[in-house]
Image: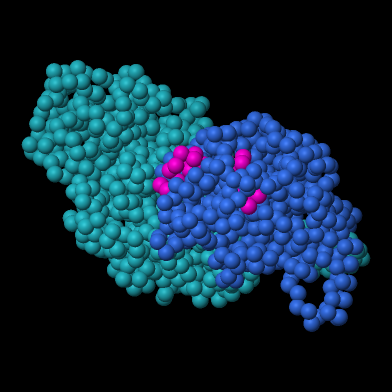
Chain colours: A cyan, B blue
Amino acid sequence: MTALFFTGRFPSLPLAHFISMFPSFSAPKAGATSSCSATCGCRLNDHSIDADKACGGRSRGSGAALGASPCISALLELNYYTKQEKLTTPHGTKLRFFIRLTIRPGMGTAAAKLNLRYVPAEFRDLSVVLILSDAKIVGVAKTSAHLTRGKTGTQVTHTGGCTSAHPLQLSQLPLQLDLNSSWTEYLMRHTRKTVGDWLVVIETTHLPLASSSVLISQTGCFSQPNQSKRKKKRRNSRMAAVPLPEFPMWAKFGYRFIVNNFVTLFLVGPMTAVGWELLQLGPDEITALWRSLQQKPIESLSAVFSVAFVAALYFVSRPRPVYLVDYACFKPPSTCRVPAATFMEHTRLINSDEKSVQFQTRILERSGLGEETCLPPANHYIPPNPTMEASRAEAQLVIFSAIDDLMKKTGLRPKDVDVLVVNCSLFSPTPSLSAMIINRYKLRSNVRSFNLSGMGCSAGLISIDLARDLLQVHPRANALVVSTEIITPNFYAGNQRSMLLPNCLFRMGAAAILLSNRRREAGRAKYRLAHVVRTHKGADDRAYRCVYEEEDAEGHSGISLSKDLMAIAGEALKSNITTMGPLVLPMSEQLLFALNLVGRKLLNPEWKPYIPDFKQAFDHFCIHAGGRAVIDELQKSLQLSAEHVEASRMTLHRFGNTSSSSLWYELNYIESKGRMRRGDRVWQIGFGSGFKCNSAVWKCLRTIKAPVDGPWTDCIDRYPVDIPEIVKL
Amino acid sequence: MDLLWTISTALLLCSLLSILWKESDRRRNRNCYLLDFVCYKPSDDRKLSTELCSDIIARNKRLSVPDYKFLLKAVVNSGISEETYGPRSIIEGREECPTHDDCVDEVDDCMYRTLDQLFLRTGVSPIDVDVLVVNVSMFAPSPSLTSRIVNRYSMREDVKTFSLAGMGCSASPIAIDLVNNIFKTRKRTLAVVVTSESIAPNWYCGTDKSMMLGNCLFRSGGCSFMLTNDPSLRHRAKMSLKCLVRAHIGADDDAYSCAIQKEDDEGRVGFHLSKSLPKAAVRAFAENLQRLAPKVLPVGELALYAVRGLRHRLWRSKEAKTDAATAARVNFKSGVDHFCLHTGGAAVIDAVGRALGLAKYDVEPARMTLHRWGNTSASSLWYVLGYMEAKKRLRRKDRVLMLSFGAGFKCNSCLWEVLRDLNDGGAWEDCIRAYPPQTLVNPFMEKFRWVKEA
């Protein structure tokens, strides 16, 4: 089944193709050239926009991040452009990229929003974006100076709604059009494009822009279009990608019910027949049967015995279940709080370079971090004091607090710990942190301790995977897993932007998790581990380099975050769910996917690839709170609702990016909100340097009451909060 | 009723067969075979002669004359020869401020060279590797060193990688333990382990004597080895793992802090080796042997030990003796043919040798490894094993005990059984003939005699 999943070009992330222009035009990447075809307007199915999930019906402002109507976005990667043209104009050479989007019926009028992310400072008068419909221009936008002035750097947003009528001809293309009024108004005047093919043309004269990434997203009000069926049909036939037929709600439910309960339904008939037959038996016949059994006691006994034996064998030979008894997250003391104002003030005092300070301000404004995130005490010094002693002190504070809390909750005695796995990416003293824990809690001398280092933010699930393997081997064992990141030694004092990012995002946190395979823990355990899937994209250079520890020109070492991060995270997630899909998806989704695949191969290659609905396999999602963009990206690619990603966003807001432990803060958020019910399935997805995407599926064993002593206790009532796109500092 | 009889018999038979099949399958897949190992041999321009060492010491302007003498004495008496290797940054005089690239280059060179050779020699493609473990104690960049290897060799996406750090000199058996546990959960798995130590970022430039000692002992070295539980590869395997015992006495404060990385009074980070280290080592050693002995020794020897222990209890209970002393009375040579001892230093080797009641012949590999390669931390065990192999000592059915100590404080040991006669030269190829040398005395003893006399 594995092979059946997502064998299309990039079908698993139909909504998530990120535009990142090439660093150099002369040498486009091999993958890019292979996917681009020669003629303009040629078919590029996979970029079509899926509008199925987007029928929220109300318009959303560009600023609202949460609680708004579902948004539809197409993040296109310029690697996947259909055509690239080089134009020589009196002003210099221009490059034009053509990208095709398909907007499907049912989507209603679309508004287009163009996000230019991480645009370099020189970005001024250089790019023209055209949106064409069926080779007719429906919209033209040119970035004008007033939009970029002063705010260059992170994000420039144009918003446009397309509602009016006069399609322009390509020849009429006013390349030098300067839009003093907003792009919205222009598009309003010139377009009424709703459904069908859109051709996005991006022009650039400026090389720095080419090395930056551009994100085109379509957000919008998706009222049902007022169209006649005939028109719709015509449009459909004209469209490059043939969409899947739409079925009414009851048909979908019926289909799911039948397929997912196929075996049960299949057995109902024969079972009723047998039952009916048994009920028909008279007392004489039953006595006769009983007598005949009594006559051959050995046979009947051995039959019963063998059935019992086989059943017992089945139960014993099942893999040992791994239970999550309980876990505890470290709650940072309020004395360690870093409100944005404090952070910026300290940054200004530490860093004399005005540009870096501005950059950090911009990042912080858009990071989605709240006013209550915490940094370790050593980072409150001006300048920070990243000594080994301070790092150890932080490690002791966060780890011991979490473990103490866990021991209090579960009544775990130190002597009962058989396996100890610690992961901390950037701080690895000798003796290890695991030895530190052994020393503090006086663990047994034959405890199996492992200290994982340098494995990035997704290491929390690597630890879980390791603990699971150990618990499969050692019967009746308790495994203590500690996930943390020590911030103290990793303060970056230089001025390189990509390395300043972690300073703004990473905050202190730790989680201690108790896993067990003892059967008696099953009664009180919160979750059972169902699957762990690990993906390592390290073989790809781009992925390997996208989170990278290095030294800048001045010798300050830090972690550099690449601009490709989102795209790479998307690819890693795709690989991960390729393995995860067949394990977790219900039969109905798998069958649809398989049929779609076969159909595309045999009948009509124009069919759109089917995207399995992961919401049917999981009830809760814990997406690593790596940053706002990561969460956005995943929400889009997995077609999740705002509530599904609420835990991630709120964790980012309250605790910041706590690296590997963030998943546990998120889980705790869901519990604190009282949403975790018995039988719910939780999907934890972690991303980390390497580049790795690891995910774990937990099954909830009992309805969990909102905890009274957790990291969220004192603030859960205030959440969810609205997190604006930009918090002006 | 005959039908009932037939069905029940069939069911019973089937289940019995399935039990048997499962059990045999489990047994077949439970083994852990060592396919091959490659020790790292750095290029000759990285050799650290005593002369160069004395120059490096002299470069540190903070040292007073007594400090200088102390260090020279440590170098000259350490039992380390002229041929050990250091990182390039130190030889080129940048030990005080090594860059990130220096550190990465040092580890890279070790990992890539050994792995290239390992894949070449075993004929295994990196694509087939299922588990990858790297243990480098004192250097943990991000992305991890495992990711570096995955990147360089384009390994599969579902490769399980583990980067162990901070586990000290005894991390090698820990890595084996990890792999061995994974082997028990999956069939036909191939694992690669890289064990090394990074010296460049851990040079101590201060003046605290307890921290300077590390500079004198630790040298560049590393080893990559391949493990598998695939029964079909058994005929190619060199050794098979019999048992593995880990002892961690970190619960004791003295033991925990006797080898610890910390800052000195002036804020320079170094590796502090305290005076209580030998005591901790003895305790960890005893702890380990207590659990190891029943697994490796023949029953006769154990019975003898029990009788002796009883006699000791009854008649001489007043004489307080340490655990090590009681353990030492067991004759380990009855169950083990070769001893790979961690080359922590001449004194460590001698002490362990004495405790186990070993002859000069048995500790020779460890002494020679210390002489030729220095203390290469976690990988030292493999150089010792390489020496035995190069000397053609390892014959079929021989049992090899690996014993290592590390910060934490840990003592880990594992017992291997040799599967075929081994006679590979490995890293020792070109110098094995010269070993053991006539004398281990440092040729500069004469030159620096004043150090001793002063």
Please give the name of the residue rendered at 11% of the width and 37% of the height, measured from the top-left corner. Answer: A145
Left or right of A103? Residue A634 is right
Coordinates of residue B346 in the picture (x, y in percent):
67, 54
Coordinates of residue A89 in the picture (x, y in percent):
16, 18
Quadrant hosting residue A317: bottom right
Coordinates of residue A156 in the picture (x, y in percent):
20, 42
**Vertical placement of residue A104 versus A27, above or below:** below
Magenta region:
B75-97
Q: Is residue B256 visible?
A: yes
Total tally of numbered discs in the picture: 0
Question: Which residue is more in the foreground, A297 or B17?
Answer: B17
* Majority secondary structure of magenta residues: loop
**Vertical placement of residue B190 versus B213, above or below:** above
Please give the name of the residue rendered at 67% of the width and 58% of the height, measured from the top-left corner. Answer: B348
Is residue B90 one of those drawn in magenta? yes
Quadrant hosting residue B353: bottom right
Left or right of B219? Residue B96 is left
Quadrant holding the C terminus of chain B: bottom right
Coordinates of residue B343 in the picture (x, y in percent):
66, 51
Question: Which residue is more in the foreground, A619 or B41?
Answer: B41
Left or right of A668? Residue A173 is left
Quadrant holding the N terminus of chain B: bottom right
Left or right of B364? Residue A716 is left
**Vertical placement of residue A561 versus B328, above or below:** above
Is residue B74 one of those drawn in magenta? no
Residue most toward the bottom?
Answer: B318
Question: Which residue is more in the foreground, B297 or B54?
Answer: B54
Question: Which residue is more in the foreground, A209 or A241?
Answer: A209
Q: Is residue A665 visible?
A: no
Please give the name of the residue rendered at 32% of the width and 71% of the height, measured from the top-left corner. Answer: A334
Please give the name of the residue rendered at 53% of the width and 61% of the height, measured from the top-left corner. Answer: B210
Residue most toward the left?
Answer: A180
